[in-house]
Amino acid sequence: MSAWDLLVTVEDLGSDAPSVTLSVASDLHIGGVILKLVEKTQIKRDWSDHALWWEQKQRWLLRTAWTLEKYGIHADARLVFMPQHKPLRLGLPNGNTLRLRACFSSSVFQTVMGVCRMLNIRHPEEHSFLRPVEEKKKKKDKDSAEEIYDLTEVPLSSASRPCLYNGMPAHFADSPQMEAIYKMLSVTQPPPAPEVITKQFRPASVVDKAHINGRWLDSSRCLMQQGIQENDRVWLRFKYFASYDIDPKYDVVRLTQLYEQARWAILLEDIDCTEEEMMLFGALQYHISKVSESEPQALSSSAAMDDLESALQCLEVKMEGESSSASEMLENMTAPELNDYLKIFRPKRLTLKGYKQYWFKFQDTSISYFKSKEESIGEPIQQINLKGCEVAPDVNVTAQKFLIRLLIPAPEGMNEVYLRCENEQQYAQWMAGCRLASKGKSLADSSFQSEIQSIRSFLAMQKTSSGSHSNANANDESINPHSLVSPRYHKKYKAKQLTPRILDAYQNVAQLSLTDAVMRFLQIWQALPDFGLSYVVVRFKGSRKDEVLGIAPNRLIRIDLAVGEVVKTWRYNNMKQWNVNWDIRQVAIEFEGNINIAFACVTADCKIVHEFIGGYIFMSTRSRSKSDTLNEELFHKLTGGHEAL
């Protein structure tokens, strides 16, 4: 075959250096091109991380056995020879920035896995990279260069789990500087100054919230293909709100960063909460920062002690189980049920009818209601099966409002039902029953009592202590309430009005350990009605106006922009299939019962929506037995799509 000249730029020679000219034939393979190139540069060094990047086609030539002809490379191709791993500035959920070496040639999914492995974060599939918001440069800001924590010297390992030393990856134990970085990752940050909060971008509407989801990077393509260059800045964030297998013993960094992301979501009003909840979030933040200053997290106890503890717990459970008497066992065999008067309300659009009282019966996983207790022997007015339903609390202890919001699956979407309870006792029992029934468990399940207990302790935290607190607390100098609540409350209340309310709520959480307080903060965040919703502005087929699609871990929600109301809800487990028409950028979904929907995306690429749906379906397939091995192939099958070339 005839020889021809191929020009290759070698990045290591500097930007001013001329390209290297190689004489090649079309049947020469990529490995041969690299060999010729290395010989011609005459630089002795380790070239194993280098590869060729084809500029016009925006692709890496990683198959070294392929020939130039097979790749379709001709004399006009602009090739660059450069390292595959380069420094990247990574913005963490806690607001700090790391500089580390990341892979620019693998898919973003694999690059995120590598970064999480280095930082000791389990379950990297829940994370992804986000393009940061463009910040306007001010003259003043030139001097205040942000602190960057440097991890570029850490060697990249291919082990699925880092080797731990004293509970942290060995590379963080190398020097005091590295230990300080691990502390920054694993210990919560102090509350931000009020002016820092007010400077940050706060979404004013659902549409504003939708714009951020247009900035997720594509998991199937590499950083270079998405215009990310060496030393560029990206954010690492939790993308899928389906936290799996959280264990405070192994997930110190993961828990801390999840807490930081949740805290900023609340401070910047990314997620709505009531005033009562805001005071409780403020109290927990205050407590967490106080405790983490006084007792830095004990990283990990020795493995032998852990084994001993779990063995003792097993023994305790066994002995408890054996001590039950025959009469107790008989009692447990009769299926328990709840009976009581409750009020029910079915919100339909534009109706103002109030709550009606009925006699309710809770059996197995369904609720039936009757006109009165006397009529409960006959046929019920309606029986509601709660299996697979959504259960959300709507509670205000001070106002004595105890509502249970139920979203019941139906062929055409979801039906909404509100149950109103009279008091805490009744609410705790019925709420616990609904939560178990939604997972397909009956009231006879062993976790029923512990569920009631956790709901009660949750309510107790919202109660303000009636007695005046000690002067020491009331005059606490260390509390700056405007650092603990969102800017809306800075305008609404003076600091001296907020302080007693936050300290009131603090009375109920002051006894919690650091880990328990962080876990409690996350539980309350996850119980908010809008938790886990990612919004995208879309236009449904046949509609003339833009609407919002809310993507949740287990359902899709159609929201009318004009009135901000939920129009329809579709669950993933009723989904038969979903497709993307890459030519017209339209997502089409088919549900059971011959229900078809199709929409085009306005504020995000349809690949992002496709990835969200596929990603959540992937998250639901994870099981304990295989928790350590990630089925990467399945993730790409569900999220990759077959984009038209």
Image (spheres, grey):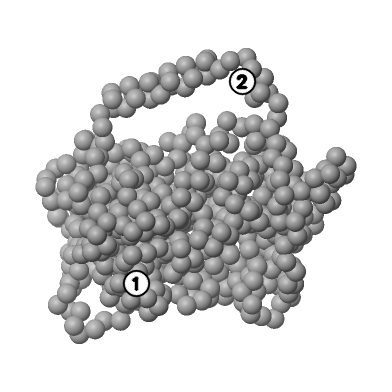
Mark 1 neighbour density, 10 Å: few (under 14) some (14–19) many (20 or more): few
Residue, far bottom: 139
Residue drawn 34% across the image and 39% down it: 250
Nearest the camera: 151 or 390? 390
- Image quarter where the C terminus lies is bottom right
Residue drawn 64% across the image and 17% down it: 327
Question: Do we see residue 81 in this rendering?
Answer: no
Amino acid of disc 2:
Glu
Relative vertical location of residue 146 with respect to residue 455 in this rendering, above or below: below
- Image quarter where the N terminus lies is bottom left
Q: Which mark is residue 508?
A: none
Residue, far front: 467
Counting from the top left corner in percent of width and height, residue 303 is at: 28, 27
Q: Which residue is mark 2?
A: 328
Counting from the top left corner in percent of width and height, residue 452 is at: 55, 41
Question: Do we see residue 357 in this rendering?
Answer: yes
Q: Which mark is residue 497?
A: 1
Residue drawn 77% across the image and 53% down it: 358
Amino acid of disc 1:
Gln
Nearest the camera: 5 or 324? 324
Tag 1's secondary structure?
A: helix
